[in-house]
Amino acid sequence: MIGDYDPENVTHTATTTALQHAAARVGADVDVDWVPTVEITSVDAPRIAGADALLIAPGSPYRNMDGALFAITYARTRDVPLLGTCGGFQHLVVEYARNVLGVHDAEHAESSPDATTQVITPLTCSLFGRRMDVEIRPCTKAFDAYRRAESTERYYCNFGLNPAYVQQLEHGGLVVSGLDQDGEVRILEHPALRFFMGTLFVPQTSTSAAEPHPVVVAFVEAAARLVNAANEPIAQTLTRQRHRSRASAVRTGRPS
């Protein structure tokens, strides 16, 4: 978890619970480690090295915006599952614009209100505390997670993607997989990566043990697959070693 944890922030407390609900559904164990943005000073920061997945938390502006961006770069370049919600979605856009699209002066209007290149801008109407329908586009990872064409989601944000950059982001490899009723982007993903998704809404706050949120479940599933893939060669090596040991025991007459 990348974010400046605040026990009074409902989106933060809900996040840990949501991950636990999703893990129970997947049949996996999760170790949730909140990493303050000030502790991430480079892409190689020790606190994120070796992470099985990264969730960029709501709650911006972050104490260290660069820390959040470094974490996103780490996940994107190493194909580590990443989910960014609310502020996490917004900073995913900033990171991608700067480091993939080459818009090096891309900024977030909340942290840089006077910047000339704002890829994240104030929403026409605040979505804080609102529940709104989201259309899920078919043939996307978001649709695979939801298995339906529409969902009602809860928002906690006042900023969103500048529409002027939608086409550029799509040409650069991202896919718009969720829209609101006005056609505004609410979910972005990268189809070529294991799991690289941003939601402007906060799925963590719409979950229960009986019904974990499908996006969070898909995120945890992607992390579990990564762990299993990493462990599979080790398991195969141990199996081969056991087989060789048994064969040697038969040849020498030693008990196996």
Image (spheres, helix red, strand yellow):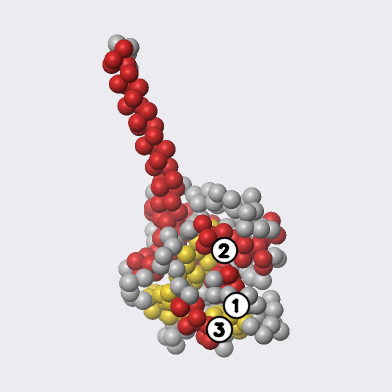
Earlier in the chain: of badge 1 and badge 2, it is 2
Q: Is residue 217 above or below residue 90?
A: above
> Residue 146 sits in which quadrant?
bottom left
Spatial CA span between label 3 and label 2: 19 Å
Q: Secondary structure at mark 3?
A: loop
In the picture as drawn, the residue positioned furthest to the top comes out as 253
> Residue 87 sits in which quadrant?
bottom right
34 or 225: which is nearer to us?
225
Q: Give the percent coordinates (x, y) of residue 238.
A: 39, 32
Q: What residue do we see at 49% from left, 71% from top?
A: 199
Q: Give the percent coordinates (x, y) of residue 104.
A: 63, 75
In the rendering, which numbered label is found on residue 229?
Answer: none
In the rendering, which numbered label is found on residue 162?
Answer: 3
Spatial CA span between label 3 and label 1: 14 Å
Q: Give the percent coordinates (x, y) of residue 109.
A: 65, 80
Q: Give the percent coordinates (x, y) of residue 57.
A: 58, 64
Q: Residues within 10 Å of mark 2 (few under 14, many from 20)?
A: many
Work out whether residue 220 can be spotted: yes
Q: What residue do we see at 52% from left, 60% from top?
A: 77
194 or 123: which is nearer to us?
194
Residue linked to disc 2: 72
251 or 129: which is nearer to us?
251
Earlier in the chain: of badge 3 and badge 2, it is 2
Residue type at numbered disc 2:
Ile
Q: What residue do we see at 60% from left, 77% from top?
A: 103
Residue type at numbered disc 3:
Asn
